[in-house]
Image (cartoon, coloured by chain):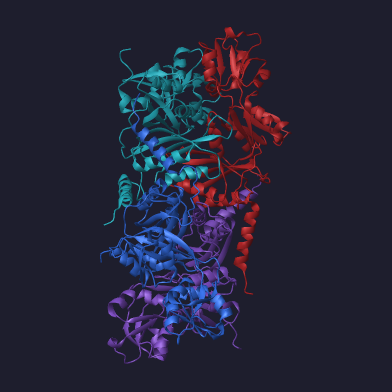
Chain colours: A red, B cyan, C blue, D purple
Amino acid sequence: MSSGAADRYAYLGPAGTFTEAALRAIPAAAGAATVPTADVTAALEAVRRGEVSGAVVPLENSVEGVVPTTVDDLTFGPPLVIAAEVALAVRFGLLVRPGTERARIARVASHPHALAQCRRWIAEQLPGVEVVAVDSTAAAARAVRDQPQDYDAAIAAPVAAEAYGLQVLVEGIGDNEEAWTRFVLARRPGPVGAASGADKTTLSLFMREDHPGALLEILTEFAVRGVNLTRIESRPTKRALGDYYFSIDCEGHLRDARVGETLEGLHRVCADVRFLGSYPRHDGRAPLLRRGVTDADFAQARAWLDRIRARTAD
Amino acid sequence: MSSGAADRYAYLGPAGTFTEAALRAIPAAAGAATVPTADVTAALEAVRRGEVSGAVVPLENSVEGVVPTTVDDLTFGPPLVIAAEVALAVRFGLLVRPGTERARIARVASHPHALAQCRRWIAEQLPGVEVVAVDSTAAAARAVRDQPQDYDAAIAAPVAAEAYGLQVLVEGIGDNEEAWTRFVLARRPGPVGAASGADKTTLSLFMREDHPGALLEILTEFAVRGVNLTRIESRPTKRALGDYYFSIDCEGHLRDARVGETLEGLHRVCADVRFLGSYPRHDGRAPLLRRGVTDADFAQARAWLDRIRARTAD
Amino acid sequence: MSSGAADRYAYLGPAGTFTEAALRAIPAAAGAATVPTADVTAALEAVRRGEVSGAVVPLENSVEGVVPTTVDDLTFGPPLVIAAEVALAVRFGLLVRPGTERARIARVASHPHALAQCRRWIAEQLPGVEVVAVDSTAAAARAVRDQPQDYDAAIAAPVAAEAYGLQVLVEGIGDNEEAWTRFVLARRPGPVGAASGADKTTLSLFMREDHPGALLEILTEFAVRGVNLTRIESRPTKRALGDYYFSIDCEGHLRDARVGETLEGLHRVCADVRFLGSYPRHDGRAPLLRRGVTDADFAQARAWLDRIRARTAD
Amino acid sequence: MSSGAADRYAYLGPAGTFTEAALRAIPAAAGAATVPTADVTAALEAVRRGEVSGAVVPLENSVEGVVPTTVDDLTFGPPLVIAAEVALAVRFGLLVRPGTERARIARVASHPHALAQCRRWIAEQLPGVEVVAVDSTAAAARAVRDQPQDYDAAIAAPVAAEAYGLQVLVEGIGDNEEAWTRFVLARRPGPVGAASGADKTTLSLFMREDHPGALLEILTEFAVRGVNLTRIESRPTKRALGDYYFSIDCEGHLRDARVGETLEGLHRVCADVRFLGSYPRHDGRAPLLRRGVTDADFAQARAWLDRIRARTAD
């Protein structure tokens, strides 16, 4: 195919989902050709095979927490790195075929996660209505369009209304007004760009053995160099019950001296460290650094050490 | 109703799911009347309303990690405590109506989590077959029985075959042979029993503010008293993007001196501590304690302190 | 003797030393009868034998650091506790018999520590003068009075001039203007008084074994409860080369909850903990406490723990 | 003088002290010309002025602890570094003029430190004898030789008997059989040699401010890189009461990767770090290293970091 991978991006489809909206919010991908995929794994595999130059997938959301498939695939699959992140407020709407009246709604389709986030509204506003779980919120919208005999309404992103010729009957029906999802752009490993000054780094850490204080040991590697964590989960390795790895986001960039030395420390202490990318924070918020942990501080300390190591008699 | 709550247990239904099998594995509930519910929240609400004496719900599994609804409901809802845990190996089977041939399967139903855990097998063994997400693996089995025109097979727990008059065509189709789910029995808060010597305690911790080293501070409260963590997740509080609480399992029991003092320390350091129960470990494995952290060690130290505080002139 | 021990205090003599001045600065002892002793051990033994109700001895000074005899005697001898401390600026003077001219000074006596603290002044102002070490600065003053043929001048506390009928020829001859000595009042163990809110506690800690991180472990016991150290020395135990104990001063009082729990923690972690007293700080400076470590914070945490331990079904 | 500094060594004199014996035990200095000095400062100043190529001075002993003058002079004076250490058992003898009978001893001279270490023996074996403090144990021996009218015996190192023509009447009179003194060889800063695998490093650390946990912060810099401390003292800076620095010995060598990174960390966290030398341990005991802190571990971690920083697309 002549277009090549460089100008195409995969995303967790179908069209009309929040993930597509996230992709459009990432400058590198905004104007590119897009390829919806059936699931997260398919999107990431397309990147690995070189069919696309990147994939946008959800990493965590405020209701469900981390998206296991994404984190596990990046951790256990062939190397990919996160090159960008974006966070979107998640607003749900009740979508119907134009002209459908609310009183006529008997059957509503949506993805289980969306249903979970609108549980209270559904119970109060649609009592007695049958709720059906389908593969995605966009699939629900499509089903409302294509199977009028089966479904009267879909709970989906308002953007799906356009994509499937539906009408937004009620907007903002999520139980939690502050709901959000964080998406990342995964690419094949390549030269890591410069630090922006407001970055995040994602890691997967495997312990050597499970001894008391092992997690404290790991966190001390971060704390002693002034690196703050923004997310941590112990994730089952799927090898055995009780065998975990740690999925971690921390502030700072692979090229920051404090992050570099932290990574070296982790490499020495852990059985394995998987680097999953350094990228600008979606909110542009620079870390509050304590004294002694800037690149300049590290450079001065190194220069001082070099001097006392090389010192010659006067 | 004459039977009262005392001998009835709710569980995440419908009948024939892994959760029912888990309930049967908990001695207190094994012979009791059971009430399947539509979702985790309904099961827990039934306990709070006093309709049942307990509810069995999944807390985490090896593929998806923590079950967000369970952890968040226990953390943010009216107080319940975990009184027991059980872990079950998760084995999936391909269930069909008796007599259905494999070559005739065109449409398969299951719950999205089960589909995720059998992804590879489906891709290899059922190419071209349409896969449909439904509310639960048991719902899939029931749909195969009740809607032969719509579904040819279900991916579900083998026990669902009995419940719905189906046949297990292939067993052990999960991609991960070691898959497991951990279930807990939630009750209304009551007198906490004695420590068994091989216990686990579940907590939700809210930080005062997000300062570098805050997590390290919290983990030091555990480590300094020799209490080992077995699970940790930073979970969004749903208040604002980047606002987290920590869901934690640690070794030991509320009545262990080292756990009690750790809880006091956490109470002083955290904005809020939610105690979610102390209960015997499903595997009966006693913790490996370092010197100085047994109840006897705590009692001796207390006696010594009392002596030097009370010491009088000779 | 009819007066008994209650109104007599021993001090490191002879009369006219800084230690006597320190004794006079301690309210409890200010107006009491005093007993000079030849050395620190004699003063402390007099307390142990019940001959005096307390002894004032130097614990550390700004030039020499800790006074080994005092710390070791309190640590290894029969139990005594520190009941008060006082810090005195150490000012040295050049004392002569009335009428002696500076040009005539050929031989100067003093204690080696005082000589060390006036080294520079002596070298510059008394070149060619012979310097002789004697047992104490007061002994030097007495020798100047009693042995005019041997000594022309003494370096001693200005107060010694009165005691021995000498004249202060030059004052403030110490090399270090900020020199100070810290004295403590040691008593037999008795009921420990209430906390004043600005206290210090003195401890001697013996490690179980010398493993990497052992000291960090000990200091974490303090830090996790917000107890700040003001002095630490690893002191040889005299058993074997490389076998040490830690002599420590920390902020706070035995009756403060945070200090009490720290002591319990140390008791569990250390091979031995010797409590050497809690007493008001000489400077009355209250500690800057971080959130969560006041007595009220400890009491609330304990009450909360008691509640969740006792919680009964509704 | 034509011989120059290169083959001359200063030591805390006079001849016949333990320090001279220590000097003879250091290979580099064993056969060199020696220069006794009146005190520690004079010995170190002779090195700074280039008059000698090194000076042997006591750093600590098992009874008195650290020798304040040595540590403070190395910390606050113009830079010198410790190039070697040696530890000697300290045995005291009662030295008399040949023919003196024990019953005739009325007056004994010695240095206050030696008197302190023989206190018990003197009290038991020489009751009623007058004890006089002089400048050094060797000065005591000389005084016995030169001032027979003033002194009958000296308490000193047995080696002093030879130097001053005396006789050892009783040997091993110290109260503590295991007494020892640790001496160091100080040189002008020069190229630091290779690590021997069993080294020690001496440092003086100045804190930025005295906040709770500041010492813990410093010790964490050591612990996180697996560097064990063998001695620590908070020493007054002589600036103000309560203003301290930390005098520290740790295992390992400036050229060990773990020590180098620790020094960089300390440089960033402390107001000032004074490096006082890396040198082979007197006992040749190699440190017990935990996993992950050898030079090879550091090199592998660095290579890994370089790889992920440089990684290019395939």
Foreground of the two, D32 or A95: D32
Q: How many numbered marks are there?
A: 0
Foreground of the two, C158 or D305: C158
Residue C196: give x, y in percent of width and height. 42, 50
Give left or right: position of B212 versus B79.
right
Foreground of the two, C1 or B79: C1
Foreground of the two, C303 or B162: C303
From this view, report whether residue A309 is shown above or below residue B79: below
Residue C309: give x, y in percent of width and height. 35, 34
Give left or right: position of D243 versus C255.
right
Give left or right: position of B151 versus B184.
right
Task: Residue lying at the far bottom in this picture: please name it.
Answer: D99
Quarter of the picture holding the C terminus of chain D: top right
From this view, report whether residue D204 is shown above or below residue D162: above
From this view, report whether residue B268 is shown above or below residue D45: above
Residue C302 in view, yes or no: yes
- Report which quarter residue A134 is drawn in: top right
Residue D285 in view, yes or no: no
From this view, report whether residue B311 is shown above or below residue D21: above
- Report which quarter residue A275 is drawn in: top right
Residue B151: give x, y in percent of width and height. 50, 16
Residue A92: give x, y in percent of width and height. 60, 21
Quarter of the picture holding the N terminus of chain D: bottom right
